[in-house]
Image (spheres, rainbow, N blue to C red):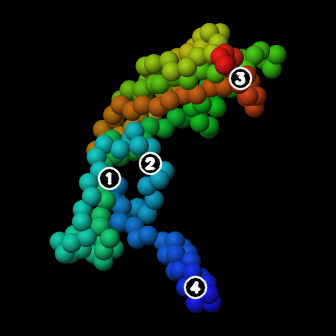
Amino acid sequence: MKRYALFLYALLLAAAVRAATPKPQPLYIVNGKETTEIRSIPPEDIENVEMLPADEETIARYGQRAAHGVMLITLRYDRPAAFPADSTFGSYIARQVRWDESEPTARVVLRYKITPEGEIVVQQELESTDNRLKRRVLKAVAEAPRWRPAQKNGAPVESEGVLSIQLPEGRRMPRQAELVIR
């Protein structure tokens, strides 16, 4: 019985050590530059991903850092679009829209594109719980300052984004009415 308990303890200890050991990561190269973190890259910004094996050719080209392979990631642009205000685009629009605390909580979600000239164009309404808020948000978007467009190889390119506005800020959306049939 002691042997069985000791064996089980050793097995659990080995499993814990294996779980605590970090898995080897490949060398990440994003748009030709080495990086250690790719979790912050939005998936919609990725144009192409190529995985190179950890063979002699790859190690000769990239050095010993490529011992676990190389992941080449090409983004749709070299520099993302930037909003010129001192805050994010969403908070800027929320400040421009007049929506009293007495108004019901409402949300508007829009998909937009930023043209190479820096203009913002609403492409699609993804969600709107109140038409008054939608009209006010669309007006604020139309009056917003131009963006600094995304760039690829030194030239401005089109990019996309999603705007989500929920007002009054800090309040939760009311729960949708549901019909339950039993």
Q: Which mark is residue 175?
A: 3
Residue at the spot of label 2: 41
Q: Residue at x 43, y 63 (%)?
A: 36
Report x, y in % for residue 29. Answer: 33, 59
Verify CB contact (< 8 Å) between mark 1 and mark 2.
yes
Q: CA distance from mark 4 to mark 3?
A: 54 Å
Report x, y in % for residue 38. Answer: 43, 55
Question: Residue 173 lies in what quarter of the image?
Answer: top right
Q: Residue at x 40, y 61 (%)?
A: 35
Earlier residue among tags 4 and 3 = 4
Q: Is residue 90 left or right of residue 104?
A: left
Q: CA distance from mark 3 to mark 2?
A: 32 Å
Q: Residues within 10 Å of mark 3 (few under 14, many from 20)?
A: few
Mark 1 or mark 4: which is in front? Answer: 4
Residue type beneath disc 1: Ile
Earlier residue among tags 1 and 3 = 1
- Is residue 140 visible from the viewing direction of this image? no
Mark 2 or mark 4: which is in front? Answer: 4
Earlier residue among tags 1 and 4 = 4
Q: CA distance from mark 1 to mark 4?
A: 50 Å
